[in-house]
Image (cartoon, rainbow, N blue to C red):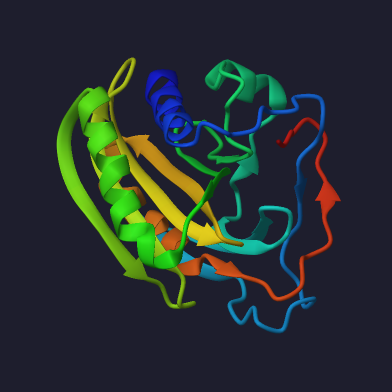
Amino acid sequence: MNYMDEQILNIKNKLNQNAASNNENTILSQTTVNNHDKNITEKNSTLWLGDKLITLEMRAILDGQMVVSVPKFFKLMPLAQAKFKYPSEHRPELIYTSEDGTVNITFNRTETPLAVEELPDFVDQMADVLRSVQPIRNWMGTQVIVNRSALSIGQIRFIAAGVDTNLYNEILLFIHAGQVMMGTFNCVESDMEVWLPVAEHTVQSLQTVSVPLPPTFEKGAYSL
């Protein structure tokens, strides 16, 4: 899956000529959301993943300024694995991965300034670049939605050729503190229908917190 992930990140960097380099020697802060922010109303929930009922858990992202719900068994990708999967210096700031590493949810800041009303045009520009450079098998379209926390999110969905198999990809573009943030969800095409509810839950759960959540540190992870 390396090729697809690297290409998406390279496209992000083309759209943001001033993106900062990663500092690979630091560690990534994360925390499970607790009662520190009264605006967070969603607690741990469950979701059917095929024929299994899984637990989802709210996690803090982007320096504790936003939160998102991901499967509880997803872990932060260790630094060694992240370096292998994303050999470029522009790897994502935050990578949550399934136990077998075949499903990934990532988040990254682009440092591209943008107003919320400009988001639809930005999504179209991103889509045009993707379609011009990606080995796309099935283009599934774009849209800008407002999730249940009133956050505007651009979605770009497509299936593309990976190294060994076709991959379902969903790119999420949203604004925080006046800048574009990018999330990605990917899995192998054959597992797409099973994992689509998790992708949708990810989109709907994204929200800003009023007070940054205090971080804890996980050994082996990294950040920008």
Q: Would you identify the image quadrant in which residue 201 lies?
A: bottom left
Tell me the quadrant of the picture where the N terminus can be found: top left
Residue 66 position, x and y percent, is: 63, 63
Residue at image location 57% in from the left, 34% down from the top: 18
Is 68 situated above or below 126?
A: below
Give coordinates of residue 64: x percent, y percent. 73, 59
Of residue 115 and residue 53, the one placed in the foreground of this image is: 115
Residue 50 visible? The answer is no
Q: Position of residue 65 (x, y in %)?
A: 69, 62
Residue 168 vs residue 208: left or right?
left
Q: Residue at x 70, y 76 (%)?
A: 210
On screen, residue 60 versus residue 156, left or right, reads right
Total marks placed: 0
In this view, the residue in front, 40 or 15, is 15
Q: Is residue 34 left or right of residue 163?
A: right
Q: Say if 177 sits above or below 191 in the image.
A: below
13, 139: nearer the viewer: 13
Give the quadrant of the C terminus.
Answer: top right
Q: Position of residue 221 (x, y in %)?
A: 74, 34
Residue in view at x 34 percent, y 50 percent: 122
- Asked which quadrant contains residue 119, the reply is bottom left
